[in-house]
Image: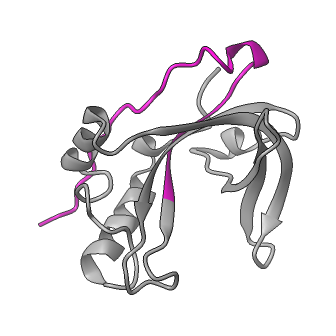
Amino acid sequence: MDAVYQLKHDADRVAAIQKATLATKEFGIEPTHGRLGSREWWSEIESGRLPVHTLRGMIGRVYMGNMNDWPGFELVTAEGQKSSWTREANSKEQAARYVVGRSIEIDYVAQRHRPDSWDGGGEAKIVLFTLPVAVAQLLLAPRRCDARIIDLAP
């Protein structure tokens, strides 16, 4: 099955986060492992210094959050733990694959927002890869963190 979302194919999102990180102290991601999407950042992931976390489960709910303007979904693990995520997708066709009851895998890295941001430098989970998977694949799926370098630094 094809991925629903791959950060390496989301140049607009990476560029926006890099711009915010470079231009302000209130927005963006703290560049502790290099600028998000840069060669250095992907190298940190590949080396394991910026660890990739994998979360697997079922889509328990699909909804519009905030003021009915932010697409979200609830992931429910086999242990019954629930977490909320943005419905990231690289296309409208892929976005339609977020369906209640479908198995899903999310690979992400945990970083921090900027210290002067709205949450005072709280944790930001940067989704690298989202894949709807067949139930039999849940325990067998390898990690996926293919790099695509996007670096706006001067």
Task: Tell which residue pokes out farthest to the front in this image.
Answer: 79
Q: What residue is at 24 percent from the left and 51 percent from the top?
A: 38
Residue 133 locus on image (x, y percent): 70, 24
Q: Indicate left or right for 62 with 122 as reference.
A: right
Q: What residue is at 74 percent from the left and 34 percent from the top?
A: 57
- Does residue 145 belong to the magenta stretch? yes
Residue 3 locus on image (x, y percent): 59, 31
Task: Report the number of discs.
Answer: 0
Residue 128 locus on image (x, y percent): 47, 43
Q: What residue is at 67 percent from the left and 55 percent from the top?
A: 85
Q: Which quadrant of the rendered structure holds the N terminus? A: top right
Q: Which quadrant of the rendered structure holds the C terminus? A: bottom left
Q: Compared with residue 86, is residue 99 higher up or lower down, i.e. above or below?
A: above
Q: What residue is at 86 percent from the left and 50 percent from the top?
A: 61
Residue 69 locus on image (x, y percent): 74, 72
Q: Which colour scheme is used?
A: one colour
Q: Indicate left or right for 34 with 77 as reference.
A: left
The quarter of the displayed image where residue 34 is located: bottom left
- Does residue 115 belong to the magenta stretch? no
Overall secondary structure of the magenta section: loop
Q: Indicate left or right for 83 with 142 as reference.
A: right
Q: Compared with residue 34, is residue 123 higher up or lower down, i.e. above or below?
A: below
Q: Compared with residue 50, is residue 117 higher up or lower down, i.e. above or below?
A: below
Q: Compared with residue 94, is residue 142 higher up or lower down, i.e. above or below?
A: above
**Magenta residues?**
125-154
